[in-house]
Image (spheres, rainbow, N blue to C red):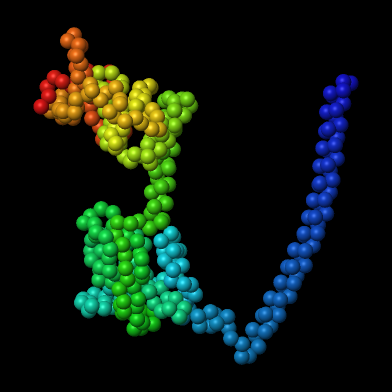
Amino acid sequence: MSDNTLDTLKFLLKDSRKLSEQFAEFKIGSQQLSQQLNNAIADLEERIAQLEESQSNEGNLPVSNFSQSFSNEEIEHLLDLPLEKILDVYSEFPQLLEIVCRRVSVSINEDSPNPILERNNQGNYWVLQLREQGFFLLPRFGSFVRMTALESLQRLFESEGKIPDSGNHEFLLKQPAKLELLKRNQRWQLAEKGLIQFGEAPLEFRWQQEIRQMRDRYQEFTKMLEKVGEAGLQATVISQRWQQELEQRYGEPVSIMINTCMPMAYAIYKGPTLVPCHVILTKGICLVQPAWDRGVPWDTSIYAKSHSRNVLRSSPDHPILANQPYFKEITYLKEQKNQTWAIANTYQDASRIISLLNGNWGSLEDGTS
């Protein structure tokens, strides 16, 4: 028998012995657990018998009547928290407050400067009671997507910022409205208006937006990885980091210049400052990205003297870039035709132009307006 076979048998014997010991321990443990369960069941049966005997005695309150005595009494939700903490919760996770609030709406035909609010399971507001602080009114999460709801909101809350005419009606609650109790659990009257700020999303919405952006970026990177491979993706990530550093140093780019005759581009930042760009054309990917994290003064660049600042526009019926702003590159060679450079405002727009030009390179000088 070989040494390897002998070692294998020893290993199996060791595992078998360990398994046997564990099974024995499990069997003993199971017996102990079974005994504990039997004891618990016997104890429970004895307690049930004692309970049945006590209920048969005269004067005891039946269980059904005991539970019924609480069914008609509404539970009071009285929170012992500072108002600042409530605002933090409302800003981050407003749904958590719904179980401790009463849903209300403005009373119909209520024209008083201090409107009355009544219980309504379809209402747009929450009433919250805080210990030793009174009653407060909060806009119910997700109820203000219609202008009619916003109209009642303005009767109860002062507002900062511009109220949107349509679209997304996000706002930040800065101070809840204060209420006076008229009828317990049923009616309240406005005592002091609250304060909201339009145009600023609560943290929960900002988190949702950030998560959505992260998901979109992940999908974008996944698609790019499939097309350009790991090396291409790494280069793209580096370029995007450079783009962020450029924006921190110079601000947003003023314009991106794309050569319409060959894959070349550069960006202009404030200063003016020129930043060379990469043009990526591979496997269906067309991108314009910064090639460095800083630029050079425009006056010292090679394009300062050869690029005209006279902005032209291609013809409306141009087959590739209709009505596209561009300028000509000045050349002093008679046999060489002037090249043209399309003007974009962002890297995304520049990438779009490159995707249209790919396979259709040529001057935009013909058919200008």
Instruction: Tell me where residue 350 sits by quadrant.
Output: top left
When the figure is inspected, residue 240 is found, relative to residue 51, above or below; the finding is above
The reply to whether residue 58 is visible in this rendering is: yes
Residue sitting at the far front: 300
Which image quarter holds the C terminus? top left
Q: Name the one closer to the observer, 215 or 244.
A: 244
Instruction: Tell me where residue 63 sits by quadrant.
Output: bottom right
The reply to whether residue 121 is visible in this rendering is: no
Residue 354 appears at what percent x and percent y?
29, 25
Q: Is residue 95 left or right of residue 162?
A: right
Q: Residue at x 42, y 42 (%)?
A: 215
Q: Residue at x 85, y 37 (%)?
A: 14
Q: Is residue 335 left or right of residue 220?
A: left
Residue 126 appears at what percent x and percent y?
37, 70
Q: Residue at x 42, y 25 (%)?
A: 227
Residue 214 appears at what percent x and percent y?
42, 42
Residue sitting at the far bottom: 59
Instruction: Tell me where residue 107 sits by quadrant.
Output: bottom left
Q: Name the one closer to the observer, 156 or 98.
A: 156
Which image quarter holds the N terminus? top right
Count of marks placed on residues: 0
When the figure is inspected, residue 116 is found, relative to residue 226, above or below; the finding is below
Residue sitting at the far right: 1
Residue 26 appears at what percent x and percent y?
80, 51
Residue sitting at the far top: 335
